[in-house]
Image (spheres, coloured by chain):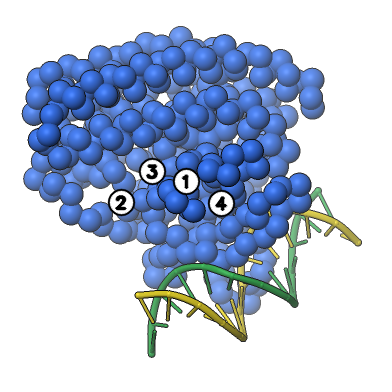
Chain colours: A blue, B green, C yellow
Amino acid sequence: MARSMGSVVDGNNGGGGLVVTELSHIKELVRQLEVHLGGSHDLCRHLTTQIFTITERSISIVTSSNDRKRSVADAGLASPLSAAATPTSDLTADGPFRNAKKRKVMEKRSHRVRVGSAGDNPVDDGHSWRKYGQKEILGAKNPRGYYRCTHRHSQGCLATKQVQRTDEDPTLFDIIYHGDHTCVQRPPPLAPAAVGRPEHNPDASSLLQSLTAGLTVKTEGLPASAAADLQGWGAAAPFYLSSSTPASGCLERSPFSASENNWGVSPATSDSYLPFDDAEWRGRNELHEVVSALVLAGAPAPAPPAVDGLDDLLDTDDIASFFA
DNA sequence: GCGATTTGACCAGG
DNA sequence: CCTGGTCAAATCGC
């Protein structure tokens, strides 16, 4: 295991560095954008804040991804990829009835993120969670907390997450998300009128455009291994931009919650965004979240080519063999 | 009183 | 048998 890991890590260092560079650039642009926005336009400032946060997370994720990858593999997180097994029987939870404690068959989609702390807890990811367990994990200094969506019973939302303080840095938390939110919880009122059109200021607009352009070009230039790295360890954004099932969206309090759930991609035509296939969804999800968030914030236009280029990079076979 | 958290027990997979 | 994930009773906090 160690041998194959080594070579991959090497490859990632290069790609990861590139990503960090670009993300840093984005960060700077956002800073400038915020300056241009001045004191007005609460929504815009909120958006820039979110972009900034996401970017910072992305950077920390990339920079810590080498360590991560090992623990991810050891923790068996790769299993959903390598064993894209029978998706049928597990999710149909017979609920709190007879075969209650019959878990462990969790072929649900999952992805990891590492987030900073807000006080003694991980930063709020916009969803409401209810803790249902805590466990000491062998080899880890800190216990792992188990959370499920508050709306599990009321709306049958099966999303869960595991939160564990990292060994190295007590201010950081590893979070593993399982499943999608299928609950519907309207976000709190947030500049309702202006939502979705953050283009008051021409300067701000052009800044955001260069921001998304920069991300597009450079990301496409990344080696596939770097892309694999990003997916293997975590998304930058612990909230979902387009992860809802077709049945019922779970918008929750996404910082980018717009009036409609379109994100510039028509549900009817966006086959590249349907989160049906576990492996594919996982593969695309991570960078998509970052890219989508940024693109969404800055571009009124529909999904840019960047997303398609990304899909080519995020080859799921590569990922599977990577973890094999 | 209700909902959330804590915590020991239970269960399944490896 | 060990470990991780979940359950559910007890407890806490509003």
Say which chain tag 3 marks: A
Task: Look at the numbered disc 4 and give the secondary structure of its residue.
Answer: strand
Q: Is residue A32 above or below residue A192?
A: above
Q: Nearer the viewer, residue A98 or A306?
A: A306
Quarter of the picture holding the C terminus of chain A: top right
Residue displayed at 15% across by 32% down:
A198
Q: In the image, what residue type sits under mark 2?
A: Arg
Task: Look at the numbered disc 1 and give the secondary structure of its residue.
Answer: strand
Residue displayed at 48% across by 35% down:
A235
Are labels 3 and 2 assigned to the same chain? yes
Task: Look at the numbered disc 2 and give the secondary structure of its residue.
Answer: loop
Identify the image quadrant of residue C10.
bottom right
Residue displayed at 66% across by 19% down:
A9
Q: In the image, what residue type sits under mark 3?
A: Tyr
Tag 2 residue: A253
Labels in figure, total:
4
Cβ–Cβ below 8 Å for labels 4 and 2?
A: no
Tag 4 residue: A163
Disc nearer the start of the sequence (1/4): 1
